[in-house]
Image: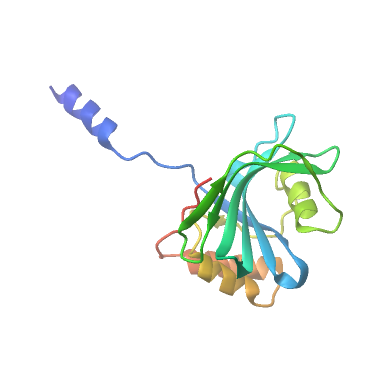
């Protein structure tokens, strides 16, 4: 009887998502776009390394404040493509979804995607950014913190501080 109760309790407990460990991977031209990578999602032991990538826009673009992409990289030829994408508004509400990009996109030098590719293909090694363990704060908080001047490390520290003790923003990929 006790065994049945324990089994029923285990089956009814909510499942826990993987722990997120966010790092700032890149900042775009004039800090208009920021790319964060979930270190816990990086998979490098495959032909095309991939990671969960969150691009936060400093201003809404047609109502979209951020895009979460499972991004795959061809490290040898500087190409990328998304396996899936979810678009969010500033309140964290899902605005839309997209499936696999059929074509690989060439990554131009000195772009946020080149820095992101180097970050993912290197397994996150060399990141100056402090980990933002657990979930991120709201998109508006992320946007506000990233807009402020400072180094990558200072911005990551501010994000981590903002995330402490607040309702987390769990990004769905």
Q: Eyeballing the image, is 155 above or below 4?
A: below
Q: Residue at x 54, y 64 (%)?
A: 160
167 vs 142, left or right, is: left
Which corner quadrant of the image does residue 103 belong to? Answer: top right
- Residue furthest to the left in view is 1
Q: What residue occupies the far front of the structure in this picture?
A: 62
Residue at 53% across, 45% down: 173
Which residue is rendered at x = 85% and y = 37% of the image? 76
Count the labels in the image: 0
Q: Is residue 122 visible?
A: no
Residue closer to the observer: 80 or 118: 80
Color scheme of the displayed model: rainbow
Q: Quadrant of residue 50?
A: top right
Q: 110 left or right of 59?
A: right
Tell me, yes or no, if residue 108 can be seen here.
yes
The N terminus is located in which quarter?
top left
154, above or below 68, in the image = below
Question: Which residue is at the far bottom?
Answer: 149
- Residue 101: percent from the left, percent from the top? 68, 40
On the image, the x and y values in percent for residue 141 come to 52, 70
Q: Please tell me which residue is depicted at 61% across the width and 62% down the height of the picture.
A: 56
Q: Position of residue 6 (x, y in %)?
A: 21, 29
The answer to whether 7 is drawn above or below residue 70 in the figure is above
């Amino acid at each position: 009887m006790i065994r049945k109760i324990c089994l029923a309790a285990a089956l009814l407990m909510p499942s826990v998502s993987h722990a997120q460990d966010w790092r700032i991977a890149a900042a775009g031209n004039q800090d208009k776009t920021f790319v964060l990578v979930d270190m816990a999602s990086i998979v490098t032991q495959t032909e095309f390394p991939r990671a969960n990538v969150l691009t936060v826009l400093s201003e809404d673009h047609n109502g979209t404040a951020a895009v979460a992409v499972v991004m795959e990289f061809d490290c040898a030829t500087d190409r990328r493509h998304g396996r899936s994408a979810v678009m969010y508004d500033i309140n964290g509400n899902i605005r839309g979804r997209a499936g696999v990009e059929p074509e690989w996109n060439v990554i131009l030098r000195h772009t946020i995607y080149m820095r992101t590719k180097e970050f993912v293909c290197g397994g996150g090694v060399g990141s100056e950014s402090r980990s933002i363990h657990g979930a991120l704060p709201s998109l508006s908080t992320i946007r506000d913190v990233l807009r402020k001047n400072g180094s990558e490390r200072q911005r990551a520290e501010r994000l981590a501080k903002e995330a402490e003790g607040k309702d987390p923003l769990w990004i769905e990929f």
